[in-house]
Image (cartoon, rainbow, N blue to C red):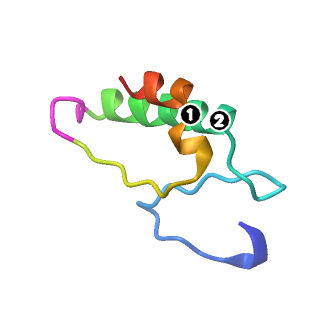
Amino acid sequence: MPRGEKAPPSVVVWFQENRWMNVELMKCYINYLNCMRSSNSQSRFPAMMVFDSFRGHLEELVKEKFK
């Protein structure tokens, strides 16, 4: 991680070298989360993600991917 930050083992942190999130990385992240939930039998339980108002989180492609 940049600047040597540490995150707890249960926390997933994704970033790019330029430190900016974009729609393509969001789509990859959603695929990853869906895969993790399916492989851990968690897909039967409700889940919630919290986002800020960053434009990449609000793109139609990202919303469609979550559906």
Where is residue 48? Give x, y as percent. 28, 47
Residue sitting at the far left: 45
Instruction: Find the magenta span and give its range.
Output: 41-46
Real-space Cα separation, disc 2 to disc 1, in angstroms? 7 Å
> What percent of the width, then of the height, locates residue 58?
51, 40
Front one among 11 and 22: 22
Dot 1: what SS? loop
Residue drawn where x is 40% and y is 30% of the image: 34
Structural crowding at the residue carrying mark 2, measured as other residues with C-alpha within 10 Å and reported as few (<14), some (14–19) or many (≥20): some
Which residue was labeled with disc 2?
Answer: 23
Seen in the image, is 63 located left or right of residue 56? Answer: left
Q: In which quarter of the image is residue 6?
A: bottom right
Q: Is residue 3 magenta?
A: no
Q: In this view, does 65 lie above or below 9?
A: above
Residue 23 falls in image quadrant = top right
Q: How many marks?
A: 2
> Going from the N terminus, do you reach mark 2 or mark 1 first?
2
Mark 1 — residue? 59
Looking at the rendered structure, the kind of residue marked 1 is Glu
**Residue under the point 51% across and 55% down:** 53
**Mark 2: amino acid:** Val
The chief SS type of the magenta part is loop
Q: What element carries label 2?
A: helix
At a point 71% along the width and 66% down the height, the residue shown is 1
Choose mark 2 or mark 1, whichever is in front: 1
Q: Is residue 4 left or right of residue 57?
A: right
Discs 2, 1 touching: Cβ within 8 Å = yes
